[in-house]
Image (tube, grey):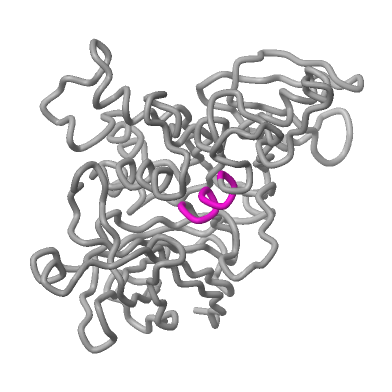
Amino acid sequence: MKRIIVALTSMAILAGACAREESNPITNGQGEIAGEVTTESVILQSRLTMGDALVDGDLPGAKGIARFEVATSMEFVDSLTTGWLRATSEHDFIVKAKLDGLDAGTRYYYRLGYGPTEDRTTTGPTRTFKTLDGSTASTEVSFVAVTGMNYHRFHHTPNRAYKGSDKDLGYPALVTILESKPDFFVATGDNVYYDVPYKGRAETAAEMRKKWHEQLVQPRYIDLFAQVPTYWEKDDHDSRYNDSDNTRDAEPSPELGAAIFLEQVPVADPSSSSPVTYRTHRINKLLQIWLTEGRDHVRTAGGSSSMSTIESKLAFSSISAMCLRPSRRRKGFEAAHGHVGALRWLRRDGIRYRWRGPGPMDCRSR
């Protein structure tokens, strides 16, 4: 295995008193998440917590230390570890590490070592991710794109809440996703709803963090992300509130919305002082995806959007994918664009784009 270069950050909120720590031991109550997988890198994330169950609707964080152990075998032979990460009060007890120098198209296994101090640690369950195959591989790829993960409506809204006996495990659809064995999971916005319910909506950092805690502590999310790496984008509800832009004075502010999102999910290098949220990934020879992250860049002029209708739809497109197919008309490849959204066809600058709703996008050679 290649030498791994690690960029680290440590994150946390207030820890409980010693007596409470004894009755609610430090653990990784929200599991782990692997994000932004490339051919040679990944961002690993966890959060130290006091137990693994909600207390008054929230999952308290815990002060401590943690590090990730990574290997190419489940037995962790010849494993490598990151340095110790301190979970402090600055960033909600979240610990993140970016690992570089990985091998393309390789299955990796990782686990979290954590505890109150370096000499009092516990080793967490084994998780896994696979690096991208890269631009020269023609391997089959399967991925899922999901939006609208409305915790309150699923759990609490009268006449709409889920009534199954397995409700506490979280959304049943996540089981279906895991059974389909996707190569990666794309969260395309509205991952939490700060403004639902509207009365008592989240406006402060603590209130916004609570929305993520109650969402990610659900066992079916933990099980899914233990095996499937992720890419994340935000929309209006998990940025500020419904149909929000970056100009109005209402809370939460655009700056706070952007900061909490970067804190709560693995999107950008945690060591970067100027993180970039719009990005593209070449999955393999036949597929490339773009994550445009329009919520960070939309502006208004005179009370209305300064972008044209088409530009705004492109800017807010949660994920665009391009199949690169061998062309019969010319040497090389031709592009077929797809989008997980409502539009079916769109013309712009003389190019006809096909926008697909939920369903498979065929990138096979024709």
Query: Residue 337 sits in which quadrant?
Result: top right
Side (left or right) of 356 relative to 324: left
Measuring from the top left, give residue 255's x and y in whole percent: 63, 48
Side (left or right) of 139 relative to 349: left
Of helix, strand and loop, which mostly describes the magenta segment?
Answer: helix
**Camera sees residue 287:** no
Query: Residue 345 sits in which quadrant?
Result: top right
Residue 259 magenta: yes
| Closer-to-camera residue (285/41) | 41
- The residue sitting at the bottom extreme is 119
**Camera sees residue 41:** yes
Residue at 31% over, 43% down: 221
Quick check: 88 above or below 233? below
| Closer-to-camera residue (309/289) | 309
Residue at 54% over, 39% down: 252
| Closer-to-camera residue (69/96) | 96
Measuring from the top left, give residue 178's x and y in whole percent: 33, 40
Quick check: 19 above or below 358? below
- The residue sitting at the left extreme is 23
Magenta-tinted stretch: 257-264
- The residue sitting at the front extreme is 249
Side (left or right) of 347 relative to 33: right
Residue 316 magenta: no
Residue at 32% over, 22% down: 153
Quick check: 18 above or below 357? below
Measuring from the top left, give residue 321's x and y in whole percent: 66, 35
Query: Residue 357 sits in which quadrant?
Result: top right
| Closer-to-camera residue (231/103) | 231
Q: Quarter holding the C terminus? A: top right
Measuring from the top left, give residue 282's x and y in whole percent: 67, 49
